[in-house]
Amino acid sequence: MNLYHCFIELKPDAKVLSFCQALEKWMDHLQAADVIGSWRLMRRKLSLASDCHGDLMLEIEFTDLAHLDQAFRHVGTHSADVTELYEPVHSMIADLKSGIYRPFPDPDRAERVALI
């Protein structure tokens, strides 16, 4: 399992509930296409977070990196339904920081992976 974390700040004129509704439609579409696992959106509580953490945190689960690659390929198709669902979400985001995490220690116990 791999977790893709996104720390999100919305644009000043964006409504957080509108973002949540658009995001839910987008994530439901990605789940229906079987390119993501479960997901959840959380909001910072009482403004308790460092500057690098956004107001919202989106967590998306992938079985492995190949599954993540499938999601990127799906989004890259730019089909009408992808564009229709992606654009409302993307247009409300002012700043996004993301990272991918894995459970640790994991079965491979790999500290470093390199080709060279």
Image (cartoon, rainbow, N blue to C red):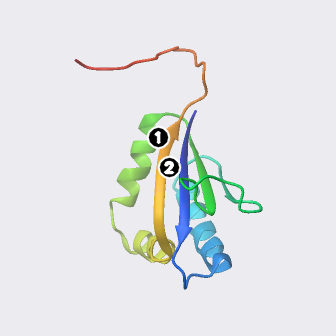
Q: Quadrant of residue 42?
A: bottom right
Instruction: State the residue position of label 1.
Output: 67
The amino acid sitting under disc 1 is: His
Residue at 46%, 40% (x, y): give it: 67
Marking on residue 4:
none
Q: Position of residue 112 (x, y in %)?
A: 40, 18
Few, some or many C-alpha atoms within 10 Å of disc 1 (few <14, some 14-19, many ≥20)?
some
**On the rendered image, what quadrant is the C terminus found in?**
top left
Q: Secondary structure at mark 2?
A: loop
- 46 horizontally vs 112: left or right: right
Left/right of residue 104 with respect to residue 35 in the rendered view:
right
Report the residue that reaches farthest toward the right.
46
Q: Cβ–Cβ below 8 Å for labels 2 and 1?
A: yes
For the residue carrying disc 2, how many other residues have a C-alpha within 10 Å: few (<14), some (14-19), or many (20+)? Answer: many
Q: Position of residue 96 (x, y in %)?
A: 47, 60
The image position of residue 25, as x and y in percent, is 60, 70
Give the residue number, with chain letter if any, for mark 2: 35
Residue type at tag 2: Val
Q: What residue is at 65 percent from the left and 74 percent from the top? A: 21
Residue shown at the point (47%, 54%) measured from the top left: 97
Pick the residue in front: 111 or 29.
111
Which of marks 1 and 2 precedes in the sequence? 2
Q: CA distance from mark 2 to mark 1?
A: 6 Å
Residue 50 falls left or right of residue 85: right
Percent position of residue 94, x then y: 47, 71
Q: Quadrant of the N terminus?
A: top right
